[in-house]
Amino acid sequence: MPGKFAFSRSREAYVVETDYKTYAIVNVSMLKNGMTLSALKFFSRTLENTDKGLKRLREISEQIGISRDNVFMLIYDDTCVKMLKKDNL
């Protein structure tokens, strides 16, 4: 499957959706104690203007059975963004 990555026998990730410019939504799964655990992760190139991607994250979460109560946005960390801007990358 294009966009699928295996990290070990028990972990894999695949790109669910991306617009190739601003965001990517990745499904990460792992096998632990005989159970498969999954999480959707949202990656953005910037901290601004992520409304379209966040909307798609919520829609995809609901489509695969993750309720809105189980969608969490972690605190923004702009360390990487600042480094990229500093180096003009």
Image: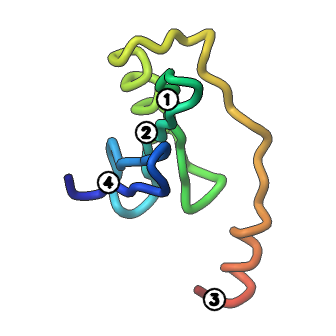
Q: Which residue is mark 1?
A: 38
Rounded to the nearest angstrom, the CA distance separating label 3 from label 1 is: 35 Å
Asked whether the beta carbons under mark 2 and mark 1 sit within 8 Å of each other, the answer is yes
* Amino acid found under the numbered disc labelled 2: Asn
- Position of 40 relative to 18 (above/below): above
Characterize the local packing of mark 4: few (<14), some (14-19) or many (20 or more) Cα atoms within 10 angstroms.
few
The residue depicted at 32 percent of the width and 54 percent of the height is 4
Q: Which residue is mark 2?
A: 27
Q: Residue furthest left?
A: 1
Closest to the camera, between mark 3 and mark 1, is 1
Rounded to the nearest angstrom, the CA distance separating label 1 from label 4 is: 14 Å
- Mark 1 or mark 4, which has the lower sequence index? 4
Q: Which residue is mark 3?
A: 88
Rounded to the nearest angstrom, the CA distance separating label 2 from label 1 is: 7 Å
Asked whether the beta carbons under mark 3 and mark 1 sit within 8 Å of each other, the answer is no
Q: Which residue is mark 4?
A: 4
* Amino acid found under the numbered disc labelled 3: Asn
- Mark 4 or mark 2, which has the lower sequence index? 4
